[in-house]
Image (cartoon, rainbow, N blue to C red):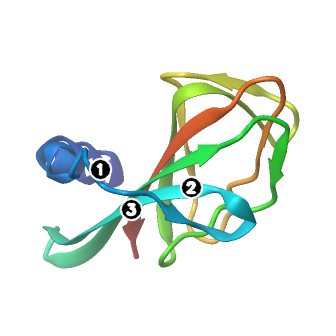
Amino acid sequence: MRHWTLLALTVATLWFAVAPAQQPALAKDGLKRFERFLGSARSAGAERRVAIHVWLIPNDRKVEDLERPFRGLTVVEVRGGSVYTAGGKRRLAGEFWTVPAGGKVALETREDSAAVQTTVVGE
C-alpha cells in the first residue's frame, strides 16, 4: 500500500514538472524517448529515486525489454495507441499496470503505434 501512496503522491506532485516541449532522444532500436529524471522523493524515512520516460513505439515493433535507468517498481501506462504485453493481452490508451523490480517490460505493437509512459520508483 505504501508503494501506491508514494507513487500516487509523486506522480500527482511532479506530473507538471515534465517539460512538454522536450526534444525526443533516440533510444536503441530506433524508439523515441522523452525522459525526465525527477530526483528523489522522501517516503517512510527513506529517499526514493523517480524517473519518468515516455516512449514512442512505431507500429509492427517488438520490444523485448524497455530500458530503465535503475532498478525499481515500474508503472507502465499506455498514453496513446495500443500494445500487446507478454501473453498476448492487448492494452489500450489509459490502461496501466505495474512491473516489479527486476521484471521485464516486454511490449509489441501491431497495426497501431503507441506512446507508453514508464514511471520507475527506485528501491
Measuring from the top left, give residue 73's x and y in whole percent: 48, 61
Q: Quadrant of residue 105?
A: bottom right
Q: Is residue 90 left or right of residue 41?
A: right
Residue 104 shows up from this direction: no
> What element does badge 1 sit on?
helix
Decide: few, some or many residues near mark 2? Use Cα within 10 Å; few <14, some 14-19, many ≥20. some
Q: CA distance from mark 2 to mark 3?
A: 10 Å
Q: Residue at x 70, y 60 (%)?
A: 30
**Residue 32 has which mark?**
2
Residue 34 shows up from this direction: yes
Quadrant where the C terminus is found in the figure: bottom left
Which amino acid type is marked by label 1? Leu
Q: Is residue 92 above or below residue 74?
A: above
Q: Residue at x 55, y 37 (%)?
A: 115
**Residue 84 has which mark?**
none
- Disc 3 versus disc 1: nearer the observer: 3
Mark 3, residue position:
35
Which amino acid type is marked by label 2? Lys
- Disc 2 versus disc 3: nearer the observer: 2
Mark 1, residue position:
7
Q: Is residue 42 above or below residue 23?
A: below
Q: Earlier in the sequence, mark 2 or mark 1?
A: 1
Which of the pair 93/72 is nearer the observer?
Answer: 93
Which amino acid type is marked by label 3? Glu
Measuring from the top left, give residue 72's x and y in whole percent: 47, 70
Measuring from the top left, give residue 90's x and y in whole percent: 75, 24
